[in-house]
Each structure stands twice: as C-alpha cells, then as structure tokens.
Amino acid sequence: MRILHSALKMGYHLFRILLPLLVDLGHWLLKIGQGSVLQSSTGIGSSVSSAPSSAWRQRVQIHKALRRVLLPATAILIVLILWQIMYSRPGANLPTPLQVWQDTWDPLIKDPFFDYGGNAKGLFWQIWASLRRVFIGFALAGLVGVMGGMIIGVNRWLYEALDPIFQVLRTVPPLAWLPISLAAFRDANPSAIFVIFITALWPILINTVAGVQRIPQDYRNVARIVRMSGWKYFFKIVFPATVPYIFTGLRIGVGLSWLAIVAAEMLIGGVGIGFFIWDAWNSSRISEIILALIYVGMVGLLLDRITAWIGSLVVAEDH
Amino acid sequence: MMTSPRLSSSPLSSASPVAGLPLLCLQNVGKTYFTSAGSFVALENVNLEVAAGEFVCIIGHSGCGKSTLINMVAGFSTPTSGSITLKGQPITSPGPDRMMVFQHYSLLPWLTAFENVYLVVDQVYPNKSRREKREIVQEHLELVGLAEAAHKRPKQLSGGMKQRVAIARALAIRPEVLLLDEPFGALDAITKEELQDELLAIWRDHRCTVLMITHDIDEALYLSDRVVMMTNGPAAHIGEILTIPFERPRIRSRIMEMPEFYELRNRALDFLYRRFAHRED
C-alpha cells in the first residue's frame, strides 16, 4: 500500500515538473521553425505583447497536444512501474515488464517477419493470418448484411417475419457458432471465417434495416411527387440516406470480428494470433502472451479507427 | 446566352388570372380517419375553386386540417368523400404538376443545391438533353439568387437559403399548382419578409398558381388574392374567404399604411381569435 502511494506521488510530481518544461521546449521549437527566435531573444515580454493572441493560442495548442500525449504516457508509466514493483519478488506468477521485454525482444519484437515454417512465424505473419480471416468474414458479412438489410428494410412483411429471428440469433456468442460451423465445413479455416461472418453480420444487418426504415417522410414525399421509383429511387434516395447507419453497423461489426477471431483461433489452431497466444500458454511462455495481447489491442484500435475514418469520408456531414 | 429568368416570363397562363376557368376544384371534400378509438372527422364539406394564376392562402389554427387538405391536393392521401380535380382530372396520386415546398425544406443532405434541383429536373424531363437540364437548374437557382451557392450542401446553407433551393426545385419542374406548406414557418422575421418579396416577384413573372398554407395573418394578406380561413376541427370546413383587393405589384410599406389592410386584418383576427378561438383542451 505504501509502495502504491509513493509511486503515485512520484508519477504526479514527475508530471508536474515535466509539463511546463515541455511546453516551453515545444514553444521554443515552434519559434525556431518560424525563424523568429532571434527576435524573441531581445525580450520575450515584447514579442508577447506585440502579438499576444497568436502567441497565447500557440501556447494553448501546444499545451493541449502535450497533454494528450503526456497524460496517457504518464498513466502507462505508472502502471508499468507498479507492475514492476509488485512482481519483482521471487516466485511471482507473472513476469515483470522488464522480464517481458527481455524474453520477447529476440526474435519476436526485433523481427516480426521471420518465418521458420509451420507455426513458427513472426508476429506480423500471425496477425496477418488473423486479419485475413477477419477481412474475408467481415467483407462477406458487409455484403450480405447491407444487401439483406436493404431488402428487409423496404419490405414490411419480411421485416416482421424475420426480425424476431435476428433478435434471437444476434445474442448467440460468437464461439457458440464454432462447433456447428466445424460440423458444416469440416475444415478449420472456413469455420473460423464463418464465425467472423456470423458475428459481424447482425449489427450490420440490423443497422441497415433501421436506416432504411428511418428515411425521413419528406424524402419519400419528394420522390413520390416526381414519381421516382424502383432502382432509381433505391440508388438516389434509399441507399444514400442509409449510408450513415450502414457505417455504424460496420464499425460495431469490425470490433466484434476482432474480438471473435482471437477466441476462434485458440480453438482451431494453425497460424494466427489467437493460436499463438494459446500455444504460448501451453508452453508457459507468459511473456509472449503479454506481448501478443498488446499487439491485439493495438490492431483492434486501428481497425476501429480505419472504419470510422472511411465512414467520415463517405458520410455527408449533416447526417 | 443566359437571359435573365425574370425577363423570360413563361407563357404558362398569359390570360388574366381570375378570368380563367377554375384550375383546381375541391367539391364537398371530407376526410375521416378511422382509428382503433373510432373515426375522426378531420374535414367536412370543403368547397374551393382556385383559378389559374391565382395566389390563395389557407389559414387556420394548428389542427384545423389545413395540412390534411394540402396533402390531399398533393395526392399523398385521398379524400374520403367529395372530389378534388385539377383541370377536370381527379387527383389520385402525387405528381410533378403539384410540386410541394415543405416547411422543413426536405432537401437531400448528401447532394449539393445544384444536385438537389437536378435530381427532380432529371426525373421529370427524361427526354431533355443533359445540357438543357443543367440550364434549367442553373436558371432556377439564379431565379432565387443562389447561383453562387450551387455547389454547397444543405448543411452549409442557412434556413432561408435552403428554402430558396426548395422553391427553385419546385419551380424548375413547372408545376400547374405550387403547393407551399408553411414554407416560411421555420424562418426568422427578416428572412421571412425577404423570401415573401422574392416569392411575389417570382409569382408575378412566372404567373404560376399558388396554394399556400400559413398561420401568419400578415403573410396571407400581403401575398394572396384570397385568404381562405378554416374553422377549427374536428369536422373543419371553410369558414370565410377574404378577397384581398390590393393592387399588384404590392409594396409592403405602402400596404401596411392602408386602412383596408387593417380592416381585413381585424376581420381575420376576429375570425381566428374570437369566433373560432383555439379551445384549450
């Protein structure tokens, strides 16, 4: 308890000392970038008073940017220090951060691209294998989800018939699909892809249906006045109006897919980050598990951000 | 080569507006809604004739069925009794001959102002060339003073500008009757007056027939040839029709000084706030 307290205090002081220093450093670097460092050397007070608002704004911006980096960095640092302290005693169950680093630096961190054949591949190839499964399953889910959602969204009867089924199926945990897909496909890889597909399908499908159903009455009225119907109505009004909902579904779907693939791969084996973790556990290489978890988290974050970014490019601002 | 649209007035109805046969004819129109709680008579025995080129405003309290009425003229719903005819043909479904301007603009947010207008022009004139259609769009955006903002999306436009786009879109397909459903209800007072003046100028040059819903008495008196005042629902009907005698072109400041304006205004106020005051229930 005392260790925790002192570590927290240490981190806090470190942060307080470092922040203003870094702000000043950043400010100074920016000035050099603008070639005005000579001018300001004659007297900081005068340069500030000549353009107080822009200088102030710069300072505030640097402050904000630094905070965004420094606060999380400090938090990570504190967690690592605590972890290091708590697991340094002999006979601890988990390795310390330094131990993890020592165990995994060569070859896992140093060379993510090695390939000794079989499952002995670098982390890049492990993650790549998982991503490939996710991409295939997720792409299929996107295709089926969007097209199916469109059809069900415009057809009231179909919606009322199928919606209860979707509501039941979407609550089935991803891994519960694995045995039945193994039974159907009799092969590990298609089964894993199917698990991804069925996991990502429901949010995409349900959001697309909701989007189609919530097209404002005004849009429909305009289409009715000019007698726009059929495919033209679909492509000019229904589809664009639904795009924001589709992207909401895709973003949820990609997140769930990444959650599901790690679990599915643990069971199916082969190359992939999920089985890499399971394999490391079976050989008691705890450090490798920890490293893999960090990578999994970062890739998941990246997938989410990429989907959100594509969505922001496609969706008109005022949706 | 772009001639000013204000000069190239359309020959839609060159005859004097009131002398023509009724363009739009409502006979004993009634609308009853059947719900699980029983039937609700919204409108009963509405009789109205609108001549070609006429500007008619319908006013009444909210819930008096004026929106129901204009929706039936647009063809979004059908009367449960009586008939509505346009040029002698009964109205059965929505059509481009009765284009509507909605209170909330109903522009498509993913299209620019130009594309919003082009979408309906393209749909209504499938046989025109691409160039002709683009010219029509351009001409009508100029008509409402938005040529500069043609490439902007609705998000980037103010409420007044959005409604201008909606008016350009409505006029671009040359409807027989222009239906306006409280078009300026969501705008601030100054923008509202600007748009009223623009609408009058466009109406004068285009000689189109306008059926407009409003709850603003001054707006109705300033714009229209006749003001139709609805009684309160249920079973609303036309209570009184005021004929507005002011000469055109109308100048707001001059009309505001006329004693007749206040006579008409008092009659309308009397109708709406004494004889058919909105019951608090």
Image (cartoon, grey):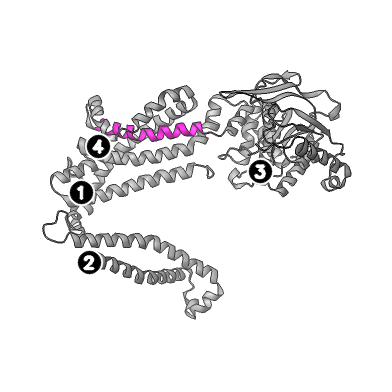
Question: Circle 2 marks a residue in which chain?
Answer: A
Q: Both on one chain, marks 2 and 1?
A: yes
Q: Which of labels 4 and 3 is toward the front?
A: 3
Q: Which of labels 2 and 1 is toward the front?
A: 2
Q: Is residue A60 above or below residue A243?
A: below
Question: Circle 4 marks a residue in which chain?
Answer: A
Contact between marks 3 and 2 (CB within 8 A): the answer is no
Q: Which of labels 3 and 1 is toward the front?
A: 3
Contact between marks 2 and 4 (CB within 8 A): the answer is no
Going from N to C along the chain, the mark reached first, 2 or 1, is 2
Q: Is residue B167 above or below residue A103?
A: above
Q: Is residue A252 magenta?
A: no
Indicate the position of residue A283 as horizontal and vertical percent values.
Answer: 13, 46
Amino acid type, callout 3: Ala
Q: For the residue carrying disc 4, how many other residues have a C-alpha within 10 Å: few (<14), some (14-19), or many (20+)?
A: many
- Which residue is depicted at the point 24% across and 62% down? A81
- Which residue is depicted at the point 80% across and 41% down? B222
Amino acid type, callout 2: Arg
Going from N to C along the chain, the mark reached first, 4 or 1, is 4
Q: Which residue is mark 4?
A: A264
Q: Which residue is mark 2?
A: A2
Contact between marks 4 and 1 (CB within 8 A): the answer is no
Q: Which residue is mark 1?
A: A289
Q: Is residue A195 magenta?
A: yes
Amino acid type, callout 4: Ala
Contact between marks 4 and 3 (CB within 8 A): the answer is no
- Secondary element at tag 4: helix
Q: Is residue A314 visible?
A: yes
Question: Circle 3 marks a residue in which chain?
Answer: B
